[in-house]
Amino acid sequence: MKFSYSLKQKTKIALLLFCIMACTILIRLLEDKSIKDMGTSFVSMYNDRLVPATDLFMVAEKAHAKRHLLASQTALHTPAGLQQSKNIDQSIDSLLGKYAKTFLVNSEKSQLQNLKNSLAESRAIEKRLEGNPANPLDLELAKKSYAQISAQLLALTQIQHKVGNELMSESKEILTGSQLYSTIQFALAIVIGILIVSIIFASNVLKVNQEKFNLN
């Protein structure tokens, strides 16, 4: 009878230890996934938000330089001015091409296409100004075009800021989850410790009872 009772107790303890082991493994897998997700989030924060935000700032600077060049009505009528304008356009295209290769949300894709359309429109106006730099109508259209470009760049920057905040929120959630997993692991370690002490204590009690039985 005692042997049967002892076997049942040991079986229960073994099953409990097995469940704890399975939980520990599962928590470990979840923790590894959290670390991987956090790493991905930080890489995306740098590659898809921080660097592109810097590139957008550079595009805005180039667009401002182009606008300043147009303000000098004779600039597009000289070889040096035309070459400077061409260099600025190439820099803008290069930066936007780099930006387009990053991860873009749908609103960014739409806004980027609008920006490209506005740039194409402004370049068509500039082409006309090459033949007649003093044309007041085209000069006014050029000003409006670059004001629109500035507004679109600002909109892209705001989207960058919004998505960046979302990534930060996701990272905080992942970190909170990771801390929870660590707490559970700590609790399981305590439970395992208690079980080990209980098993040792139960074994000592059983041994003492066995010795008393033998003496009798």
Image: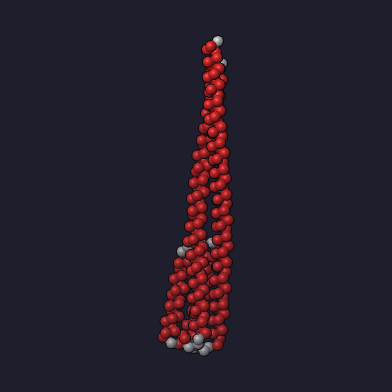
* Residue 7 percent across, percent down from the top left: 53, 22
- The residue sitting at 52% across, 89% down in the picture is 134
Residue 158 visible in this rendered orientation of the protein = yes
In this rendering, the answer to whether 201 lies above or below 162 is: above
Nearest the eye: 160 or 76: 160
Query: Which color scheme is applied?
Result: secondary structure
Q: Quadrant of the N terminus?
A: top right
- The residue sitting at 55% across, 61% down in the picture is 164
* Residue 187 percent across, percent down from the top left: 57, 39
- The residue sitting at 54% across, 44% down in the picture is 182
Nearest the eye: 215 or 95: 215
Nearest the eye: 93 or 117: 93
Query: What is the quadrant of residue 170 in the picture?
Result: bottom right
Q: Quadrant of the C terminus?
A: top right
Mark count: 0
Residue furthest to the top: 216
In this rendering, the answer to whether 59 lies above or below 76 is: above
* Residue 30 percent across, percent down from the top left: 52, 45
Residue 15 visible in this rendered orientation of the protein = no
* Residue 97 percent across, percent down from the top left: 45, 68
